[in-house]
Image (cartoon, rainbow, N blue to C red):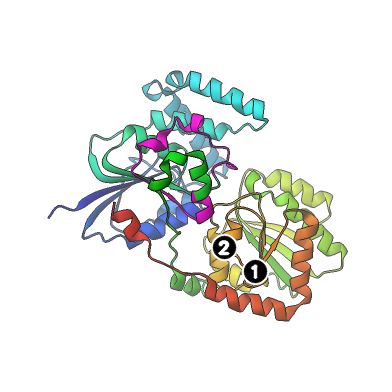
Amino acid sequence: MRKKRLLFVINTMGRAGAENALLELLRRIDKERYEVSLYVLTGQGEMIDKLPPGINLLNKSFNSASVHTGEGRKYLLQTVIKSSLSKGALIKNFPYLIKNGLDMIKKGRILPEKLLWRVISDGAPRSKKTYDLAVAYIEGASAYYVCDHVKAKKKAAFIHIDYKEAGYTRKLDRDCYLKFDRIFGVSDEVADVFKQVYPELKEKTGVFHNLLDVEGIREKSKNGEGFEDGFEGIRLLTIGRLMRQKAFEVSIKACSILKKCGRNVKWYVLGEGEERKKLEALIDKLDLKEDFILYGAVDNPYPYLRQADIYVHCSKFEGKSIAIQEAQILGKPIVVSDCSGNREQVDDGEDGVICDFNPKSIAKAVDELIKNSEKREFIAKNALKRNENEDSLSKLLDI
């Protein structure tokens, strides 16, 4: 009997939540029944080294440098230029770029990467092979590519973010999702917001929770390096890329409030991104160089997470945060901002604390946990019970 042919397409393989979730999904697929291929549109990302065995990587060349390094940014620029010149992608999309660019200017929110996804998609290599199922695992380029340039009997798309807040529109998509057989949001809220944008796809849209290796995370938390600075106060930890969506400037100001109240805390951030210089300037301005530490990206964040006293995840918007799930798996007391995604992952006062997204509210929520060790323990115990690890794989493969 012929194996079913599956193709997964993603924009990059950088160190982020969606990429981690994809790796776990690929790991669980039965390679005896399915021939599984992966295509990464930018041909780039440091997580490619973690690709499970038995997966056919279609990229003829691949650069494992992070887009947050000099080498990585240079390679990404080369990819964009190459895609623009290939197959007339830039000329073909010029009216699209102008029209959507002007719309962004009118709204006062210019998102060049959203425009470039279309150019990268149209300039990417194509295959004559027909797949039984092709999956666009993230928004933007992968969705456009699977819709327009992949031959498949069935097509599915994943949505990992609040579609409206992220800046996507039907005009930007060119209604590409109408051509998919199934769409999966990674949380109920993500799916609901998407259905508001595409109400006619209500029946085709469902929820597919991120798959996590629970035992693997717990095992990795006991191995490898963690914090080695000898700090004996309260460690606050956040895991996330240094990007506008995460708005770390709000957390930095919250840290300043805590320090002014005399709290013996250090706030660490595991992650890298284009906002680093801006955030470093604010840290210097508020005299927090020893207190708010941009630790950078690490291969194994779990020992750090295990050592943390409180996990804080406050951002403008989310889809479904894998970092929050990982903190729950390791039994951490959690503080999150009141936004899409986060609300679905935490029961306020039971297995976490939900606060408004401003420095005073974040500082107050963290301070209450600092002062109340019994509450910290109560929330941590409930967090351990929270993370159901359902196997959603059949929802996808049954297509």
Write down the region rendered in magenta: 163-191
Q: Secondary structure at mark 2?
A: helix
Q: With respect to residue 285, does 171 lie above or below? A: above
Residue positioned 54% across, 71% down in the render: 386
- Frontmost residue, 219 versus 339: 339
Q: Secondary structure at mark 1?
A: loop
- Frontmost residue, 269 versus 211: 211
**In the image: residue 150, left or right of residue 372:** left
Q: Give me the disc on residue 214.
A: none
Q: Amino acid at mark 2?
A: Gln
Which of the image's four quarters has the N terminus?
bottom left
Circle 1/circle 2 CB separation < 8 Å:
yes
Task: Tell me where residue 70 appears, x and y as whole percent.
Answer: 57, 41
Q: Quadrant of residue 303?
A: bottom right
> Label 1 crowding class (10 Å Cα cut-off): few <14, some 14-19, many 20+?
many
- In the rendered image, which residue does mark 2 sit on? 345
